[in-house]
Image: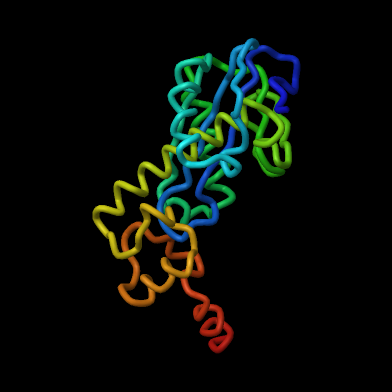
Amino acid sequence: MLKLNYSGFSLEVGTDEAGRGCLSGPVVAAAVILPKDFTHPFLNDSKQLSEKKRDELRPFIEENALAFAVSFVWQQEVDEINVLQASITGMHRSIDALNVIPEYIIVDGNKFRDFKDIPHKTIVKGDAKYLSIAAASVLAKTYRDEYMAKIHQEFPMYNWARNKGYPTKEHRNAIREFGTTEYHRKTFRLLPEQLKFDLKIK
């Protein structure tokens, strides 16, 4: 059973991101403040839910949250600042975009930078422990999946509608055959062969 609150503050925001481990597309982050009477029968970490369940949850979260925001950190910026910093930057932007100023921040994972003067707590596997982080994980994942399905139309050979940009065998084979696109993260090891090549030139 997921808990509703960690800090005791009524305006506690949960934040999470999706897409850190992908070879293409943005990192997407979300921030959600839930009301104190919020409940849902199957809200959980987005990775534990089917796509159908996530798609059902998204409008429910958006309609019932006190505040929510979603932000995209595009692949070029991921390459510039690295994926961890992109994740934290995305979470900061989401919190900053809320129409309510939170009193406390709970973050999925173990890394975060101070945001303004708002206290925060990092929680490993927080998306499976606290409802607001789980809600943020669902929003981040559904918004990102929707975007990847959209750019799939432009480059169907990578099948992003299915693999969402993750390093599946199918995705890597397509990179091998067709090369990269503007949506690929150029600083990531897109193919296993890159490691062998890197070793040779040292």
Q: Position of residue 40 (x, y in %)?
A: 59, 21
Q: Position of residue 20 (x, y in %)?
A: 54, 51
In the rendered picture of this protein, how many numbered marks are placed on residues? Answer: 0
Q: Split into 4 quadrants, where in the image is the N terminus? A: top right
125 left or right of 141 in image: right
Q: Split into 4 quadrants, where in the image is the C terminus? A: bottom right
Q: Residue furthest bottom?
A: 200
The correct choice, above or below, for 185 with respect to 142 in the image is below
Q: Position of residue 97 (x, y in %)?
A: 46, 25
Front-most of residues 35 and 7 = 35
Front-most of residues 183 and 115 = 183
Residue 123 quadrant: top right
The correct choice, above or below, for 77 with respect to 180 in the image is above
**Which residue corresponds to the image point at 48% horizontal and 65% vertical from the top-left?**
168
Residue 7 quadrant: top right
157 left or right of 118 in image: left
**Which residue corresponds to the image point at 62% horizontal and 31% vertical from the top-left?**
133
**Which residue corresponds to the image point at 70% horizontal and 25% vertical from the top-left?**
119
60 left or right of 182 in image: right
**Which residue corresponds to the image point at 25% horizontal and 53% vertical from the top-left?**
153
Q: Position of residue 82 (x, y in %)?
A: 54, 55
Q: How is the image coloured?
A: rainbow
